Image (tube, grey):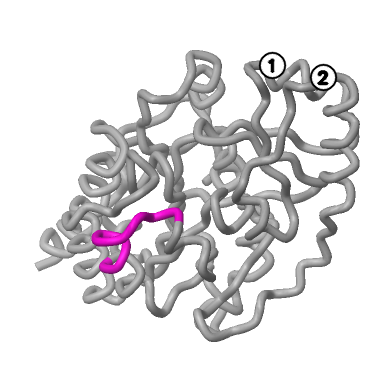
Amino acid sequence: MVIKSILTMLNEMSQKPGENYLHRTYLPGYATSVTRTFQQIPAEIARKLRLIMSDVDGTLTADGEYFSPDVVEIVARLQEKGITVGLVSGRTLENGGVAQVSQEGDLVELGYSRAPAWAAVTRLKAVFPGQISERKDNAFRTVDVTIHTGGIPVEELKKVAPGVQIADSGYMVHVMGEGISKGGTLAKILDKITGRPYGKNEVMVCGDSPTDISLFKIFPVSVRVLNPQLSAEQLQMMEGTAAYQSEQNIEKGFIQVAEYILASYKTQQ
């Protein structure tokens, strides 16, 4: 999770292809059966938030390439209110496999190995010859392996590669060792982010796809940002996973939630 210079990153990504920029160094609530609209987040809880951790693809950007000027602006306004904003992405943070607290800092040692993922991919290639191949972005990864699946359903892949996680984020398929998750890693490094303990009620997590569900299970102020680009199966998996959800889609959904958080300060005046 890179926190301190997220505005610099967002500004650059509003002008440069996101994949090239994100691959440089940037890394980075309790699920309910009935998800409420973000407008049901109590104002007193909204005002206590000090950290927002957000997924990237499908949450802050629709095309995976650029952040809109509106996203850059809302993040700046949040940080002016003293709310730190960070990223927890499957693209560069490997769904919790990698963590970095500051741009200049070293990677946090999490004890994860890439060996189980590579072994599983080797097995998948043998079972599905000519259909499984690695994505080019693996050159930038250290823990998970991303693959092209040739249209083979993830559930079929899981049957022949036990002992690992295989997850479809809606943008790519990730293979990674067991026990790795965005939520688990964020909980591990939470105290390192600004050098003081954070209560879980001071943190809001935002995401759109099944790879974000681990965040929703751990942090009570969780927001599902609607993403109609997901498959029907993925949309079904997301039902009831977060405490709250946006009304608009993707970056517009994130922005309306952030606007609501900022507006909560006005109700106090």
Dot 1 corresponds to which residue?
152
Tell which of 31 and 100 is nearer to you: 100
- Relative to 216, say whether 103 is above or below: below
Reply yes or no: does residue 53 show up in magenta.
no
What residue is rendered at 24% in x and 33% in y?
248
Q: Earlier in the sequence, mark 1 or mark 2?
A: 2
- Relative to 197, say whether 158 is above or below: above
Tell which of 234 and 229 is nearer to you: 229
What residue is rendered at 52% in x and 53% in y?
89
What residue is rendered at 60% in x and 50% in y?
137
- Distance from disc 1 to disc 2, alpha carbons, whole Å, reads 9 Å
Name of the residue lying farthest toward the front: 130
In the image, taking residue 209 as reference, residue 229 lies left or right, namely left
Which residues lie in the magenta part? 11-19
Amino acid marked by disc 2: Phe
Q: In what quadrant of the picture does the C terminus appear?
A: bottom left
- Label 1–label 2 contact, CB within 8 A: yes
